[in-house]
Structures are given as structure tokens and as C-alpha cells.
Image: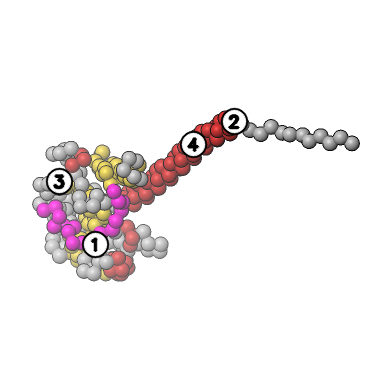
Amino acid sequence: MKRTDAFKQAFTMVEVVFVIIVLGIVASIASELIAQVYESYIVERSQYRASIKTELAAAQIANRLRYAIPRTVYRIDPESGTIEHLESAMSRTGSDYNVLQWVGSDGDSYETALTPGWSGFCDVNTSSRTVISTPGSNLSLTNTIQQNLGNTTGKFALFFPYDSSSVANYGSGTTATVTLDANTSHIDEHYKLAWSSYALVVDPTDGNLYLYYNFTPTIPSSTSTAFYNQRPRSLILENVTTFKFKSDGNTIRFKICQNERLDIDINVTSCKEKAVF
């Protein structure tokens, strides 16, 4: 029997080199696509995080501003310290102001589940300009809640509408009677009770937005930082690039933007606008 050996032809050197080149091109394209997909994922994740952060910050600001007492909201020029009512004409452009200050009514004791700490109603027939009768109030509860929140003085302020000469009146009270420290020039059937002012401030040293609280509930007069300086503060948002606010009738509108830096070449910015009635 005759044996026949079969020989198979191998790849030539040219073919091997060509295959290696093709595989290298495919690998480079695939790696570039993977890098682009990963970079897009990183950017989208950062955009999502920045959007969540600004949305939460805007919600916190709106929640605080909804308790702002009318005619107590002011903006402050950081350079001159000039205090301007939010409804007045701006002496500078809107982006030049970095402080928004207001007196906030005590919503914590007003919105208690059973009976409100203060009712918001004044019996003008049984009240005077030093002793205010407020039916339906439980001012002992108000004092307790405020002390738990940081009002160690036990004092609060009453704000009557349409009173331009004397808006804040410090006093203390139990049950349903408030004794004022000084005569008020005007009493009305409705009032707001407050124990703290608030200020939103963009700190120029770190670019973060802070909420200052637990300082005198009164309308600012001349000095800007004296009211909230050295008072407790909470961080609202980091890396704030824009914080603008204005008044439109009984509505406060604000815009806040935050910057997320991924690297030297990539920055992600998220902005939120809200209106508070």
C-alpha cells in the first residue's frame, strides 16, 4: 500500500503582519469607543449628581422663604454693606448681591398637630399696645418648641401688617397673652410671630452657600454682617457660581447654580430656579 503525506500551506509572513495590523486597528477603535462611553457615563453621572444637589438646595431655600414675613426681606450689597428692600430698585446688578436676609415666622410651633403655639389672631378689643390678647394660642408650647430649637432668650417678636413705624415688638407670653417690652404703634387682627432672622450668604472665601439663623428677628438698619456674623450656620450648597434673587409682587424668585469639576478640561454646571409665593 502506498502512503501519501498531505502538506498544508501555512500563513505567509505578509499575511501574519496584515492580520496583526487589522487586529491592532480594531483594538484601537474598540478601546476609543469604550473610553468615550466611560467618559460619557462619568459626565452624565456628575450632571445627575449636580442636578440633585441644586434641586435639594433650592427646595431647602424655598421651604425657608415661604415663612418670610412680608416687608422683612432685604438684599445686602457686599462691598458697601448697603441694605436694600427686596422690592426696591437695585443699585447694582443682580449678580453683585450675595446676601439675602429676612425674618421668618415661627412655622414650627404654628403648625403643631394638635393646637397651634400661636394662632395668628389678635383680639383688638381686649388688647392694648403693651399687652396683646391672642385667642386660640398656647404660648407656653411656643416657648418650649423655640427653646428646643435654640431660642434660649424666651423672647419673640410680633409683626403686624401695615405697621411701618414699629414692626418688631419683643415680648414673652404664656397661654394666650403677650406682654410687649415696648409700646407698639399699631395692632391689628392678624399678626406673625417670629424668634429668628435668616440670611443666605455666599461666602467669598470658599464659594459655598450658607444659611445663617438664630439671630435677632428685626429689620436690618445699617450694618450688614453685624446681624448674622458669628451666628450658627448650615451649609446649603458647595461651589456656587450663581445666586440671584428678586421680588415680583408677593413672589420671591431666585436662581442658584452649582459647578462640579471633573478635571481640568471638564466642568459640569447645574442651575435651578424657583418662585416662592
Q: Estimate the spatial distance between the alpha carbons at disc 4 and disc 1, rounded to whole Å.
A: 56 Å
Q: Which stretch appears magenta?
A: 223-239
The answer to whether the residue labelled 3 contacts the one labelled 2, judged by CB atoms less than 8 Å apart, is: no
Q: Are marks 4 and 3 in contact (CB under 8 Å)?
A: no
Q: Could you tell me which secondary element the residue under label 2 belongs to?
A: helix
Q: Amino acid at mark 4?
A: Ser
- Can residue 45 be seen in this snapshot? yes
Using residue 77 as the reference point, say whether residue 214 is left or right of it: right
Residue 28's label in the rendered image is: 4
Q: Residue at x 15, y 39 (%)?
A: 92
The spot of residue 214 in percent (x, y) is 23, 61
Magenta span has 225? yes
Report which residue position mark 1 lands on: 232
> What secondary structure is found at the residue carrying circle 3?
loop
User: Which residue in the structure is indicated by mark 2?
Assistant: 15
| Residue depth check, mark 4 versus mark 3: number of the one nearer the observer | 4
Residue at which label 3 appears:
77
